[in-house]
Image: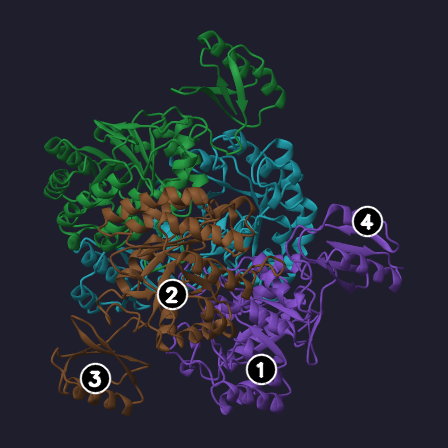
Chain colours: A brown, B green, C cyan, D purple
Amino acid sequence: MIIVMHSNATEHDIEIVHQRLAEHHLLGHLSRGKERFVIGVVGGNIPEALRTELELLEGVQETIRITRPYKLAAREFHPADSIIQVGPIAIGASNCVVIAGPCAVESEQQIVQTARAVSAAGATILRGGAFKPRSSPYAFRGLGEEGLQLLALARQETGLSIVTEVMNAKDVELVARYADMFQIGARNMQNYQLLEEVGRSTMPVLLKRGMAATIEEWLLSAEYIMAQGNRNVVLCERGIRTFETATRNTMDLNAVALAKRRSHLPVLADPSHGTGKWYLVAPLALAALAAGADGLIIEVHPNPDHAYSDGAQSLTCENFAALMPQLTAVAAAVGRGI
Amino acid sequence: MIIVMHSNATEHDIEIVHQRLAEHHLLGHLSRGKERFVIGVVGGNIPEALRTELELLEGVQETIRITRPYKLAAREFHPADSIIQVGPIAIGASNCVVIAGPCAVESEQQIVQTARAVSAAGATILRGGAFKPRSSPYAFRGLGEEGLQLLALARQETGLSIVTEVMNAKDVELVARYADMFQIGARNMQNYQLLEEVGRSTMPVLLKRGMAATIEEWLLSAEYIMAQGNRNVVLCERGIRTFETATRNTMDLNAVALAKRRSHLPVLADPSHGTGKWYLVAPLALAALAAGADGLIIEVHPNPDHAYSDGAQSLTCENFAALMPQLTAVAAAVGRGI
Amino acid sequence: MIIVMHSNATEHDIEIVHQRLAEHHLLGHLSRGKERFVIGVVGGNIPEALRTELELLEGVQETIRITRPYKLAAREFHPADSIIQVGPIAIGASNCVVIAGPCAVESEQQIVQTARAVSAAGATILRGGAFKPRSSPYAFRGLGEEGLQLLALARQETGLSIVTEVMNAKDVELVARYADMFQIGARNMQNYQLLEEVGRSTMPVLLKRGMAATIEEWLLSAEYIMAQGNRNVVLCERGIRTFETATRNTMDLNAVALAKRRSHLPVLADPSHGTGKWYLVAPLALAALAAGADGLIIEVHPNPDHAYSDGAQSLTCENFAALMPQLTAVAAAVGRGI
Amino acid sequence: MIIVMHSNATEHDIEIVHQRLAEHHLLGHLSRGKERFVIGVVGGNIPEALRTELELLEGVQETIRITRPYKLAAREFHPADSIIQVGPIAIGASNCVVIAGPCAVESEQQIVQTARAVSAAGATILRGGAFKPRSSPYAFRGLGEEGLQLLALARQETGLSIVTEVMNAKDVELVARYADMFQIGARNMQNYQLLEEVGRSTMPVLLKRGMAATIEEWLLSAEYIMAQGNRNVVLCERGIRTFETATRNTMDLNAVALAKRRSHLPVLADPSHGTGKWYLVAPLALAALAAGADGLIIEVHPNPDHAYSDGAQSLTCENFAALMPQLTAVAAAVGRGI
């Protein structure tokens, strides 16, 4: 349920609403928007009688029943676009954001060289995996904390902010020491312990859509994080699993446009995982911005042929640099900057 | 197999190649490109010895084994983009094409009013179904020949070319009397009798991808048409069936970019069927052009709330008119006109 | 809508109901069951007032609104299981039916040898394709009428009834001259012209589920046939297209059980196409009978390694013979014979 | 790589092989089967030279390259069926196992009543969730440790063994104190930290297939557990996510049969989640046994209409009791007991 307050409601009015909710063991989240001033009530079934009662209180304009199962992530709860700050970078604002970097951190030379190249080309956040989820227990699973240290070094060298995957609740604190933004990978979109752990942090979270997750389930996973208090969630579409085998995944740009409509959270797109082929990254990156994505996360490697993982879908530094002006042109065509 | 001829090969050289193929019960299709001059050999397994033999002939530069199962539709066979002419409109050239109109022709007033509106907004081809495939035998299935007559009337009034669906081989001649381009719907993508019947025509064919067809199967269906002699095939991505239920289909823009790479045929996108929701049509239409589509086919209805079919995914004439300048801007950003 | 008549309603009562329907441009289909005696009304929206009016007529017990979009195929319309007769064989009765034979008819020797082997093992209907739908225009597409003649010859030699695919409306008459049952393949499940053409015949129809068709769409395709007057429809699950690539399709036995519940039509299963691997045919054939299928259609070839098509999923005659007693045992376990 | 030893190889021979592997930083797992006696070598690329070298050693019969990415879980590594002991119950032996119980533990009365009913009907292991993964953070998530205590109480009352889900690595120790078998749920199939944590235990693990996991990925997740030393893994197919919406999931019995072929691990089936509808549980349970499943896990609730979760797919105690003799009959038909 959402309780819409009068624009001139007082702090006391709000306090009374919270008290009344508490009597019913319900918790209200206050959101002060420019246009609306609302209290979202999370939790199970709300008695009809309570709704009527609330509407009679001073300062309450109306109550709105929300049929969608997510609340804090819902556009109805927060009509304006949310802007999430990652270091100096604002995600969800008028400028689109480009995150770039290798699939995995492999060495100092590799990560620093890539960071310099993508920074020079215009990226503002560096990606790079220190902990890698791999289908096989025998595959390269990342450098661990050493990888995090190398990312921090690359940040020092370039000024780029850092986003990197955290795979386990127990690593949240460790990763938080080095990174500027957590990444929750597709396989972990419904790892609820992990979601709640990053939800207790204040660091922004890049939440990738699971490869067979519906848009509703994706938003519910955002809700898991937000319900713990961390509102700094950025959604990321990265392709879904379908019958098509000519591409690694099927990039679902419907989901980008629909998530932007149903939620106030920023939505990025990952055309590297979304296609699985480096030569499809550029057209799909352009398409994602045209569809309204607030930015991109792109795999770039100085030498994709020798990458430890995901080489087939990584751009070279040169191809990435060539793509940036095209992205700027399409962003401008839809009224955005980069 | 593709036989690449020397640029200075004579008609006699070509004749000899055809004879040698005929001795092996194989059929060659000659394609005279600007850059290459090639003979595509359709048919089953080609003996290795024959390849060697052919390479020794006068005028033959080399032979190329094609591992993909389609040949005439393959980019290797025809390296340059094919341009398909529909009346005065060139599909696949530097300008993107916008096809618009209602799902079904319902009345003279409806189709003429829509035709005028979309023409004024910049569309150059009118869509509208006279024969409608419907999952239920009890649903509205189109006006039939009367619908075709109304389309012809709308063409007369506006100068727009006409594309309309042909569902059955026996209707090909009838539809050809009224239309400028056949549409093969998603359900009929593997209706081989129909494919071959339009393949014996010279009228351009808009071939929609089946809702569970792989990109390879889609190109093989183009091959069915082309193998009968009709090279005027335009591909159209219209969304695939996946687990996601929040949208009618999942628009697969990976497929647009990949089909452009694997084939020389123009590729359009249908964001109306691809999303099933009118409010997602604009972002996905823009995305499709950014991904490299050669144009769009968009459902427009003067009064979607009262449409006989597909109202939920139809733009109003006003929304369509508002979309056109945005399309022009994104097309320009990727170096195309409209 | 279904109009349930009193068990003692007269012909005159029925006539009056038909007249009243006709006044509203509605068509009633009478069905005389053992337990119930009902009139199904096919067609669009039925005014509430008409329902009330009908319930007041002599002989009418009640009217039932059907929310599912199919009517003639619905279990509500015909509560008892339908039994479809193919020559001497009853499909849908207490005995399960086993149809067996090669994917394609290749030669007299091949088809007669296979027919003798599967007949000896206990199959009662012979399958074999004379017209083969193939994704590629360059693949073997069947022997055509010669194949039909060879099937007729095999019937003469063995007494087996014949089921074979008809791909085009124009071939319906030709196939009907040779076959005992039409097969509509998965690719043609929504080829409505073809469905209606076989619907105007009285010959039984084996209707395969499309590879991305929902159960509802499948039953609607049955409805297309039945609405033309041919009630002799047998459904056949043959696997759906999913993300799994280790098997050719994903056999959907949920669909077998659910179709049996929602419809009165018999349901067969095709474990050959459903799995694509000969070594999975036996377990899935057994599973289908246990799930309640009324029978099986299994690809058998005397020499799968040299089959023109589908060799990988064909059983040898020996493996088929070995499977039959296992099928009999599982059928017995669920109260059926073979 | 698999190193097949001579049946008369000595401990010393084995020791030498292990040493040689260690020199190449490779780890060998010894498996003493009745028929074969093999060492599986897990880890990355194995130099061809090493294979040759190993084959020259005393006691080595041959080396086999495994192209599948899993090794310990592969049938090649362990040709005989593995039998996993859960308390007194052997899973994978000639008798099929029936696990039954409610989705979630709700109260002492509910779990004890259900345990008595399913035990009386013939089930030998009790299921019941104390920790429930839920898409929404606002849904009932289980009683936690209190639920585990109630399960232990039900075991005391009935003698049934207990399987219950563990969702987080940090809960492994807690769950191990009460349960006889861990369940890893579909959402956690690729929660690698959790897999490795249960892999360091010796308690048997029921590993459910992820709802969009390929069979290969599923076996790789088993490999994650086994590579840590815990070989007591039982696979469980529980339906995959497809386009079909008439059922909650699509039960993939192809996967049951194929997993049995590719792996030596026992495979169970969960027709409750596989269908999502209680009236489809019986036919699909029977089908799963016919397809070769080593047992079933079935949701049973004394009062499904009032279940906190999954009521629609739960059998009543009466329906479960009625199903058991049918299961016994089908099991017998394929040569198994219950």
Tell me the subunit letter for badge 2.
A
**Which of these two is toward me, B283 or D28?**
D28
The residue under the point 48% across, 54% down is A112
Q: In the image, are marks 4 and 2 on the same chain?
A: no
What residue does disc 1 label? Answer: D175
Q: Is residue B256 above or below residue C266?
A: above
Tell me the subunit letter for badge 3.
A
The Cα atoms of the two marked residues, 3 and 1, are separated by 41 Å
Residue kind at label 2, given as amino acid type? Trp
Residue kind at label 3, given as amino acid type? Arg
The Cα atoms of the two marked residues, 4 and 2, are separated by 52 Å
Q: Earlier in the sequence, mark 3 or mark 2?
A: 3
Tell me the subunit letter for badge 4.
D
Tell me the subunit letter for badge 1.
D
What residue does disc 4 label? Answer: D53
What residue does disc 2 label? Answer: A218
Tell me residue A290's x, y (percent): 28, 49
* Callout 2 secondary element: helix
